[in-house]
């Protein structure tokens, strides 16, 4: 890696670390471009050279979740769509738990426009790898006839994203008093069961009904 590349990497890391620290210690309202620059000791011009906005910095954490577990995400190719989706969300939620309660409780708030939504103009699904991965998994399951055809991949993926965020918000309100991984797994599985077909049940659930 060249000295220029090393410098670029260091500046980006400093910006992300500064945003992370502000988020944990002062809350999302303190995560402004000026505050990030002051803490990271970089110029505003340097900030905008690497990131387009504070939302771009905040959405990077979603990308980071994928990058740190790229190999694990890329091995999710189980034909069982429910098992695959649950594995995907478990990987992501494990990443959040590693970031810690203070990060999660300050990140998952209504004022954070970086949290992905299909109706958001700030973050597209292409910017959030886990969303794109899950949509591809759903599309393949629909093609194979394992999911009902009266819902699109985008609609189902959007519903799952809302359940995921709702579960995280409830966990934050309860001050992390229960197992986030198991609870989210339970909610997502129950919802997905409403959309699996007879073909899916015969192939993947036949052993459970005997």
Image: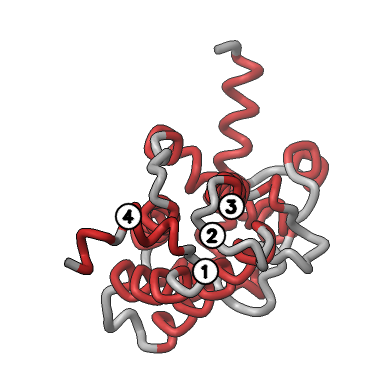
| Badge 1 or badge 4: first in the primary sequence | 1
* Cα distance in 3D space between marks 1 and 3: 10 Å
- Residue at 57% from the left image edge and 43% from the top image edge: 14
* Cα distance in 3D space between marks 2 and 1: 6 Å
- Residue at 65% from the left image edge and 79% from the top image edge: 110
Q: Position of residue 69 (x, y in %)?
A: 41, 40
Q: Position of residue 116 (x, y in %)?
A: 66, 62
Q: Secondary structure at mark 4?
A: helix
Q: Residue furthest bottom?
A: 174
Q: Nearer the viewer, residue 103 or 143?
A: 143
| Badge 1 or badge 3: first in the primary sequence | 3
Q: Which residue is mark 3?
A: 142
* Cα distance in 3D space between marks 4 and 2: 12 Å
Q: Which residue is mark 2?
A: 147
Q: Which residue is mark 1?
A: 195
* Cα distance in 3D space between marks 3 and 2: 5 Å
């Amino acid at each position: 890696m060249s000295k220029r590349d090393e410098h670029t990497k260091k500046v980006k890391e400093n910006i992300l670390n500064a945003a992370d620290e502000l988020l944990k210690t002062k809350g999302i309202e303190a995560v402004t471009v000026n505050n990030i620059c002051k803490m990271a000791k970089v110029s505003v011009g340097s900030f905008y050279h690497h990131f387009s906005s504070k939302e771009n910095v905040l959405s990077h954490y979603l990308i980071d979740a994928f990058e740190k577990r790229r190999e694990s995400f890329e091995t999710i190719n189980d034909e069982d769509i429910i098992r695959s989706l649950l594995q995907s969300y478990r990987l992501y939620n494990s990443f959040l738990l590693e970031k810690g309660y203070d990060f999660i409780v300050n990140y998952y708030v209504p004022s954070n426009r970086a949290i992905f939504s299909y109706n958001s103009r700030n973050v597209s699904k292409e910017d959030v790898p886990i969303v794109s991965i899950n949509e591809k998994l759903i599309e393949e399951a629909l093609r194979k006839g394992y999911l009902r055809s009266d819902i699109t991949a985008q609609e189902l993926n959007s519903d799952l994203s809302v359940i995921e965020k709702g579960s995280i918000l409830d966990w934050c309100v309860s001050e992390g008093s229960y197992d986030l991984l198991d609870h989210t797994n339970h909610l997502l599985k129950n919802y997905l069961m409403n959309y699996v077909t007879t073909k899916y049940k015969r192939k993947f659930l036949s052993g459970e009904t005997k």
